[in-house]
Amino acid sequence: MAKTSNASSLFKRVAIPLGLSLVTLAGLFCYTVQLQLQLQQQQSISQRPFSGLISGQTQQDAAAIGNEVGFKYKHNVNVNGNGNANAKNNRPSSVKIKVNDLQDSPELQEHLLKLGLTPNHSIHVERLDCKSGEVTSSTKLHGRFLHITDMHPDELNVIGAEISEQCHRKREHIPKDERSHVFGDAMSGCDSPMDLYRDTLSWIKENLKDHIDFVVWTGDNIRHDNDRLNPRTEMDIFDMNRQVADLFTQTFMDDDEADIMPIDRRVSVVPSLGNNDVYPHNLFAPGPTLQTREMFQIWRNFVPSEQMHVFDRGVYFFKEVIPGELAVLSINTLYFFNKNPLNDNCDSRKQPGYKLFEWLGYTLKELRKRNIKVWFIGHVPPNPKNLHLSCYNKMSVWLHEYRDIIIGGLYGHMNIDHFFPLDSVKSWKSIRAQLAAQGLIEEAASLQFNTYGDDEDEFDDNLKMYQELQLIDEDGEYATESLSKRYEAAPHGKVTYLENIRDVLLTSVKGPKKGGLHGERYAFAHVTTSVIPTFNPGIRVWEYNISSLYKNVDYVQQHEFEPWSEFFTRLETQLAESDAITEMLDTFEDTDPIHLQYSGPGVDKTIPPVMPADLPLGPGYISQLFSPERYTQLFIDLKKVEKLDNWTLEFTKQYSTDESYGMDQLLVADWVKLSRQLSKSSEGSKPLEKRDGEDKNNDDDDDDGLYEGESLDDGEVGILKGKKLWQKYLDHAFISTGYQEFEFSKE
């Protein structure tokens, strides 16, 4: 009966008003029934050893934060990780919780300090039966996670091969500086030797795995297709993706977890798809396709089974890394990528990027309802260099309007350690201009987004920013004059790339008057260094706040939510209905007014609703549970180790954010301040206190153009400090290779 009811509802809501054909409806009905039958076969999901943690901070802490931002605290709890708090009897129940801070041994403290990590940062959480008091489950949380990206293992890489031959072939009389080494060579253009790839994961297993909670893994697990004598095949790509996924499964398994399903193990692994993980590279079609189905099989240990059918639409999904509390949302950024020839924009209903944003909207709405905080991850970072303008605009406004739950975004692809802001005001202005250009004048005028007082220049939007940015091609196809072939395939123009980000994006970052007291106008994308030796290999360990978890709480009352399986069944129906509307609209000419009926805010589900004013700012903006505190970047100095005989791979600390940048924590306001400090090195930089249009000498000015801790020093001393900081930033960006000193580092 349920299937008939669903089909009838679909007919009433979609087919009758839109005049869908019976053939189309029959196909849609069969597809829906097939999804439901397949989903029923996926309902047997293993129980987690520890299901759920309390949401938010203590009531006292939350009330204090609530007073600051003007909201009333509501304690929200979800104990069951799959969202089904008490489905059988549908009544609230309580769980007894016991939390202990863990004291690290002297040996462990020494080990963590050597890696630049914080000792005594872990807790032990026990769940007890309320009547007997017996422990029913327990877990450790360390308040740390690993970000690893762009491994690019290459089975054809040969030690002692000629660097200019992609390190694939040897020949006689190769100059010493043009020979490849066992763990690779920075700025060589070669992919990762298998020893680098395997030994990196082995080192992580021995030195980091026991001290992290989850892993963010942002793609590119295949060699580049740059050897014409050995072109990649689709089967090669599937096979290597499978090999790497299987090794990740083994690496992050605890000793006592052999009998536990991989997806239910203590350390969650969340992957995202890279542009080299597909065939041909960069090109990825909307699903279902052979590639989407194959990727689900390859990632079966990482993707929740109830999301299989949504995943099949485009390799996007989310995973609760702390059940009921914290999730990582994996976005297929190839659907936004301007080098994917199968997508042109994110405004057309037929585009895969549009469909991804539809899924994102429904998913974020549900995560907000459950008060689950979220990290975004993806392979291609959302900057103007990489994304179509409409995709960039929508990514920015979604991040902004869900700033109560979204903590930040983590990416790879660029092989450069850097960050950049996304400006919600410019993005909303661009969306408004686009709606007006489509003839939706009233709809454009109805957008009531927060401008943070920045209303004077209607045309200061992202279109203008795209026109200003002259970013070089990521492949760096520029000739270089060099007597040696050692750097023939080195990346070109990457300093220019960072200077463009600084001169256009960082110099425009506003102070608290027009950026918000907590910098909430902005979201930030964080791009980490890669394992592949484009520069030196590196990985990153983030530390986040778990200090307030369960403090002063003895009993936790469950919050009732429907099982996730029910949400995904409904989501599949909603997405199928949208597909049916798209099919119907495709029968009309592009100029037909019917298209306008399905455009604009409220109707177009890819444009987010404005965040309700009574919702608090989330962990990305105000210090609370799950707020990022610091990170440490670990690396291998390849130039140093190539001179050592029988060296065993070991990562060492390159830098940490607190020591190098003086950042006490990693909230958005902290990144805003660092952006403004770095921008002082730009030739066209305005004084910080004037970036909000303020006049320092005006008596009516209340001098609120600076964040706490920012310096007014914009004179010669300030510029010198900015330039010194910029040089440190470049050293970090290129992983201490000295790349910025080479002539080819600039365009």
Image: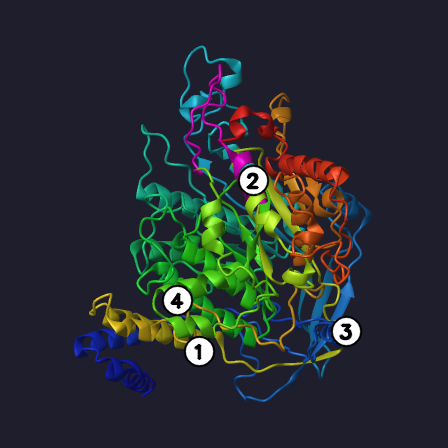
**Which mark identifies residue 436?**
4
- The residue under label 1 is which amino acid type? Glu
Spatial CA distance of label 2 from label 3 is: 39 Å
Q: Which residue bears the numbered disc 3?
A: 64
Using the rendered view, name the quadrant where residue 37 is placed.
bottom left
- Residue at the image position 59 percent from the left and 30 percent from the top: 740
> Residue 79 location, x and y as percent?
62, 76
> Residue 589 location, x and y as percent?
21, 67
Using the rendered view, name the quadrant where residue 588 is placed.
bottom left
Q: Secondary structure at mark 1?
A: helix
Mark toward the start of the polypeptide (4 vs 1): 4
Mark toward the start of the polypeptide (4 vs 2): 4
Give neighbour class at mark 4: few <14, some 14-19, many 20+ (Cα, 10 Å): some
Q: Which residue bears the numbered disc 2?
A: 498
Spatial CA distance of label 2 from label 1 is: 45 Å
Spatial CA distance of label 4 from label 2 is: 33 Å
**Contact, mark 4 vs mark 1 (Cβ under 8 Å):** no
**Which mark identifies residue 566?**
1
Left or right of 691 on screen, residue 304: left
Q: Which residues are magenta?
A: 473-502
Quadrant where the image shows the N terminus: bottom left
